[in-house]
Image (cartoon, rainbow, N blue to C red):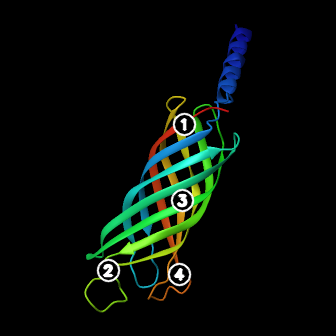
């Protein structure tokens, strides 16, 4: 009886380990659409604020582990500290993604660099009535997330969390011009092809 129980336990454990190590096919390309929330920390005397929006990306997988990503996102906030600002950030980022592909779950990390277009209907440097201002600045996003496959071609992304850096000159005492922001995204991923 003990030997039968031990043998059944070993077979069960072997099945669990084999299932956990089962490899899913690597998609050739992935297209994702996300809701994105950004916590913007402008630095200096300006207070932090939230922006909501969306992002989309295209990823080409070179192999099972390495892929390249192009990510476009737009985030907006109507007011900052009860001042109507119409603040909008449009980001365009590119870089490598490193995947750890399991049977249904794919954790990943990525390093994206590029730029951001910062626009506002309020210019803090202006003493006149609110005037629109915009500028293109350096931006980077470093972080990672998890995709969970529903089918071979559709996955959900419950979390993607990134340090989101923008470097915009400011009239405040933020001398290094770095805005140390946080970006959270969640969405759906469509997968094409198989390697």
Mark 1 and mark 3 in contact (Cβ < 8 Å)?
no
Which residue bears the numbered disc 3? 162
Q: Is residue 74 above or below residue 137?
A: above
Quadrant of res 125: bottom left
Quarter of the image with the N terminus is top right
Quarter of the image with the C terminus is top right
Mark 1 and mark 4 in contact (Cβ < 8 Å)?
no
Q: Earlier in the sequence, mark 3 or mark 1?
A: 3
Q: CA gap, disc 1 to disc 2?
A: 41 Å
Q: CA gap, disc 4 to disc 1?
A: 38 Å
Q: CA gap, disc 3 to disc 1?
A: 22 Å
Secondary structure beneath label 4: loop
Q: CA gap, disc 3 to disc 2?
A: 27 Å
Q: CA gap, disc 4 to disc 2?
A: 19 Å
Q: Earlier in the sequence, mark 3 or mark 2?
A: 2
Which residue bears the numbered disc 1? 191
Q: CA gap, disc 4 to disc 3?
A: 19 Å
Quadrant of res 51: bottom left
**Residue 169 x, y percent position in the rendering:** 49, 83
Which residue bears the numbered disc 4? 177
Which residue bears the numbered disc 2? 122
Which is in the foreground here, disc 4 or disc 3? 4
Q: Is residue 92 above or below residue 24?
A: below
Residue 73 relative to residue 8: left or right: left
Which is in the foreground here, disc 3 or disc 2? 2
Q: Earlier in the sequence, mark 4 or mark 1?
A: 4
């Amino acid at each position: 009886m003990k030997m039968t129980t031990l043998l059944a336990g070993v077979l069960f454990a072997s099945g669990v380990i084999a299932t956990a190590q089962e490899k899913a096919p690597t998609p050739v390309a992935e297209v994702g659409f996300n809701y994105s929330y950004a916590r913007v920390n402008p630095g200096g005397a300006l207070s932090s604020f939230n922006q909501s929006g969306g992002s989309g990306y295209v990823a080409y997988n070179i192999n099972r582990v390495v892929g390249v990503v192009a990510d476009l996102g737009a985030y907006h906030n109507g007011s900052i500290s009860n001042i109507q600002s119409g603040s909008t950030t449009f980001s365009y980022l590119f870089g490598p993604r490193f995947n750890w592909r399991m049977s249904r779950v794919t954790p990943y990390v990525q390093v994206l660099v590029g730029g951001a277009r910062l626009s506002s209907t309020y210019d803090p440097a202006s003493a006149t009535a609110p005037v629109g201002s915009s500028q293109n600045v350096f931006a980077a996003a470093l972080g990672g997330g998890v995709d969970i496959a529903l089918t071979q071609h559709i996955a959900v992304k419950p979390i993607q969390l990134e340090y989101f850096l923008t470097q915009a000159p400011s009239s405040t005492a933020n001398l290094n011009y770095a805005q140390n922001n946080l970006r959270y995204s969640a969405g759906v991923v469509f997968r094409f092809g198989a390697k």
